[in-house]
Image: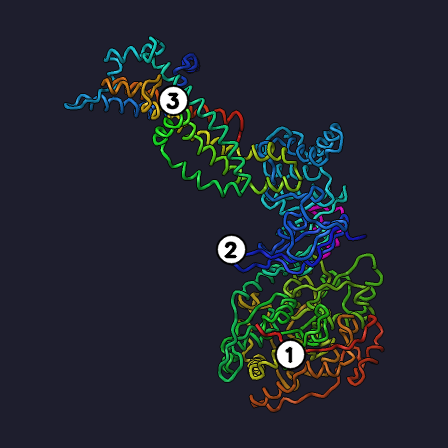
Amino acid sequence: MSVFVAVDSIDKVFPLSGGGEYIALKGINLEIKKGEFISLIGHSGCGKSTLLNMIAGLDLPTEGIVTLEGKMVKQPGPERMVIFQNYSLLPWLTVRQNIALAVDEVMSGYPAEERKQIIEEHIDLVGLRHAVDKYPNQISGGMRQRVAIGRALAIRPKLLLLDEPFGALDALTRGNLQEQLMQICDRYQITAVMVTHDVDEAVLLSDRIVMLTNGPKSKIGGILTVDIPRPRQRMEVVNHPSYYSLRSEIIYFLNQQKRIKKLRAKKTETIARHGLEKVNLELGFVPLTACAPVVIAQEKGFFAKHGLDEVSLVRETSWRGIVDGIAGGYLDAAQMPAGMPTWLTAGGNQEQPLPVVTALTMTRNGNGITLAKHFYDKGIHNAQALSRMLLESTDKPHTFGMVHPSSMHNILLRYWLAAGGMDPDRDVHLQTIPPAQMVADLKAGSIDGYCVGEPWNLRAAMEGVGFTVATDLEVWNGHPGKVLGVREDWANKYPNTHVALVKALLEASQYCADSAHHQEICQILASRQYLSTNVEYIQLGDPQNITCSLETPMREYAHHRFFGEGMNRPSRTEHLWMMTQMARWGEIPFPRNWVEILERVCRVSVFSTAARELGITDIKYRREPIKLFDGIPFDAEDPISYLNHLKIKHDFTMAEITLDTRPLIAA
Amino acid sequence: MTTTVKLNKNGTKNNPVLAFWQKHKNDLIPPLVGVIGFLLLWEMTSHLPGMRLPGPSSLFTDERTRILLLYPFYDRGGLDKGLFWQTMASLGRVAQGYSLAAIVGISVGILVGTQPFLDKALDPIFQFLRMVAPLAWVPIALVALQQNHPAAIFVIFITSVWPILINTTEGVKQIPQDYINVQKVLQLSKTKFFFKILLPSALPYIFTGLRIGIGLAWLAIIAAEIVMSGIVGIGFFIWDAYQQNYISEIILAVIYIGAIGLILDRAIAYLQKLIAPGQ
């Protein structure tokens, strides 16, 4: 379909009363197709209403143009009818007169009889026959808005613009009106743009949701396509698998905007002290058992010991928050899934290569693959059985949760599925879900299984909703779990801070590895500001111990490993293997300059300096090949032929990834 | 038992005055107590030694006043007329001056309200003239118009036009953005905008102006008539009575003036209800 409405690089600048100006919108581009329903969502003051007004022609852009069917919008007109939040009915006219005023004026070319018919038709359309001679102040808010909708539709606009149409209504009325509006829009194929701050409303009504960032200089932060089929029912859309992911996507976006606003207001200044370039660090983490080194470094004072006495831990609920924090420059460093530095560097995030380095592997193991209980009841206890079952029952799509494309969970789950003969994209559906949400989704039945770090496998087993079908011990024992990641430009700017940070975390890892401290660590992790969970779900221990006494099959519990020989030093071989896996599934192109990328991602020098200064000299680089459960050898000298040998894979691409270090922490 | 209750019920129902009193006594007793108390206090004060102001009872006890009170419609020609005729003469002047003020005030108000340039140009003049007291206009009017009657009408006009004009201007300027948006989006014609949006939207403001205006007009006429000797009118009646020391007549006239002012205000309020219901 062709473009119906085009918003072309619009800027809007408001002059301020005290001189100066306020740039409300900057560089907005939007194309709307005929018959599409678009929602504009964002925090108050983000300029969404301003944008709507510019489409309506009530306001003109400072730069750029809006076109409707190729014609530039210069002034308001009835072909772009607006439904205002406060209804904008004329209180001295009855319901019928209000509609008639619009119809008689706009459709003055029609014979009077026909106009009358249109008026009556639309009174019936919005179901106001019984109140037709009442004045607006004699009817309820919901009815008033129905009059406004009837008035707008009666003049047959090409484009319907709605400015928070249901904002002032109670929930029940709002729901009914949303449904009515949706039916009318479906029936008449109306093109509409709606401003709203109600996430559910946006998902219910829209074909696409345009999310605006906070002002000043608001821009489009993202556009979501709602793939829920029409006609939609308000009570049924919530059951559609996309509903909650769309919803959480929007809420994540809105929360992120709020945080950015807060961070902007905070105005961080770099504090240099103790010979370190920066001691006030914002350190991101995701609440998992694997965050123990980060938490312990803070709680047991390892950061302060190494001079970093103003570290604040920033809890993110999903890895996406970590990505945005690192990309946006408001996190100094973060706990990352092992694949993330490579993934970011190779342009996994919005195809924008962002050089990120890692100088420390903080944890290994601690992950598992959980399947819903009903698989167990059907006798599916391993990948082969699962594969057989999936191939036999193709009618129902099976959804598995993982936490991030670049995390070990995604990589291992895909590897495990593929080794079992399943194509992780064709035979099942993989969905990104924040770790803490996995058990709830499994319980609700919206996913069939997941691969995630502890405590979420153990918890599913203990709550009886799922069982651990495979742990790290059966996929890749000793794989890297979480690493410390910082931006390359940050590492170059604050080299001493980087070393101090690695030292603190390395010592914390050492502390975590001592079983004498486990009780204490579990208590700390379970507290509200970290995992906020029942302490019994958190298990630390000797990875060789059988502590998890699930019912059969008896599983060896893949405990986290925090410290030990060859554990913490970043390994290029491992990162290369992860790179091949991410390329295998199309998360990133395989870099032609993979040697350069690896060199830059793995800051072994920082690790070595840190270890030496700590006096830990017995940490050697463990030169041993990667051993996965299926026994396929990985040749670190020739990753491309390894990739080619794998049977189930995507058509991966090769690309030269040009890295230019941008000066980013300028603010 | 039941029959007695029934009888009682019927008894109250059969007496509408009693029923009305039962229903509204809580609203009626306080003002009655207030008014009677005030009159009693006044009456008592008037009997104090050295007090020259007569009490309310003088309306009956004083013979001249009693005649005026009981025969408002007599007409002995010249200035010697009953209070009804005196009042009507004053009201007639008010009607003329006030109508003129309403016509000029509303039309100029709309013009000024819609033209920001005119608004800025004329606002200081309006604000200045508004502050001139009605009595100050009397000599100017007499000098300019030479005669009593047109001068009186002019004074009424010039006193009552400002609140009407300024309120109308404000009403037109204060048309809610919502209605302006409706006009813009529907691209309503000028006449339709005027009659369907501008005028109805400004009506409450206009009526506020009209109500203030009628009050001022009534105040002005009394003042003007006192100064303009030798005409029929309740203002001059008071002045005349004062000159001749008929104090109780003044009291009677004052009661008339208050009552008429109240009625005029109510009348405009009623008119507003009639023209712009529910606003």
Q: Residues within 10 Å of mark 1 (few under 14, many from 20)?
A: many
The residue that label 1 is drawn on is A488
Q: Residue furthest left?
A: B49
Query: What secondary structure is marked by label 3?
Result: loop
Q: Chain of mark 1?
A: A
Q: CA distance from mark 2 to mark 1?
A: 43 Å
B224 left or right of A171? left
What is the x, y in percent for residue A227?
A: 75, 54
Residue A514 seen in the figure: no
Specify the label residue A625 is tagged with.
Answer: none
Query: What secondary structure is marked by label 2?
Result: loop
What is the x, y in percent for residue A392?
A: 85, 61
- Front-lying residue, A519 or A31: A31
What is the x, y in percent for residue A586?
A: 78, 70
Residue B236 seen in the figure: yes
The kind of residue on which mark 2 rests is Ser
Residue A230 position (above or below residue B213): below
Tell whether position A386 is magenta: no
Q: Chain of mark 3?
A: B
**Do tags 2 and 3 sit on the same chain?**
no
Q: Chain of mark 2?
A: A
Quarter occupied by residue A666: bottom right
Q: Earlier in the sequence, mark 2 or mark 1?
A: 2
Specify the label residue B147 is tagged with.
Answer: 3
A638 left or right of A49? right
The residue that label 2 is drawn on is A17
Residue extent of the magenta highlight: A224-237
Asked if labels 1 and 2 touch by Cβ distance under 8 angstroms, the answer is no
What is the x, y in percent for residue A211?
A: 66, 57
